[in-house]
Amino acid sequence: MLYHLTYRSIAIPEISVEQIEEILKIARDFNSKNDISGCLVFSKGYFIQLLEGNKDTIKELMDHIERDKRHTDIDILSAGEAEERIFQTWDMAYLKPSEKMQSDKANEIKKTLLELTETKVDPDFTHKVFWYNVDSLLREEGFYTV
């Protein structure tokens, strides 16, 4: 059975573009080898991630993620069995710190993510929690907390 998990964390204040690119590379390599899919969003100092795949693999991955010193205050928002994947490949939305939210690129990314929050047909609770938190981050509203 497919399993999925959504968490949110706070990046360390001194996180660099290079560190985030390293996270991306390692995640893409691991996920492709272990049939993990999902979405990682980094914006305004927060990571929000949805992982989909084998339960044991995701739990092992979360153990590794929780030990990562590049972020703190890891909050697992929802986890459980899933009927289907909503991400068939690994994706990440990321705005470099030098890019202002007023830029065309940033606004396009924000628009696309906001549209995605509204397009999933019959999402389950974990998917809803993920998209609600992404939407709240991008709209600068409060987060869902457990």
Image (cartoon, rainbow, N blue to C red):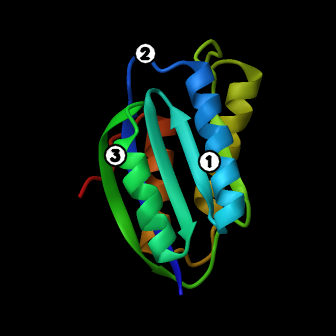
Residue 58 x %, y %: 48, 66
Looking at this view, is 52 or 97 the one in front? 52
Circle 2 sits on which residue? 14
Question: 10 Å neighbourhood of mark 3: few (<14), some, or many (≥20)?
Answer: some
Residue 67 visible, this orientation: yes
Mark 3 or 2, nearer chain start: 2
Q: Extreme top residue here? A: 98
- Tell me whether circle 3 and circle 2 mark residues in contact (CB < 8 Å): no
| Label 2 residue SS | loop
Question: 10 Å neighbourhood of mark 1: few (<14), some, or many (≥20)?
Answer: some
Residue 131 visible, this orientation: no
Q: Residue type at mark 1?
A: Ala
Marks 3 and 1 sit apart, C-alpha to C-alpha, by 25 Å
> Disc 1 vs disc 2: which is toward the camera?
1
32 in relation to 44, above or below:
below
What residue lies at 71% left-to-right and 18% top-to-bottom? 103
| Label 3 residue SS | loop
What residue lies at 73% left-to-right and 60% top-to-bottom? 89
- Tell me whether circle 3 and circle 1 mark residues in contact (CB < 8 Å): no
Q: Residue type at mark 2?
A: Glu
> Which numbered disc covers residue 4?
none
11 in relation to 98, above or below:
below
Q: Extreme left residue here? A: 146
Circle 3 sits on which residue? 143
Q: Quadrant of residue 120?
A: bottom right
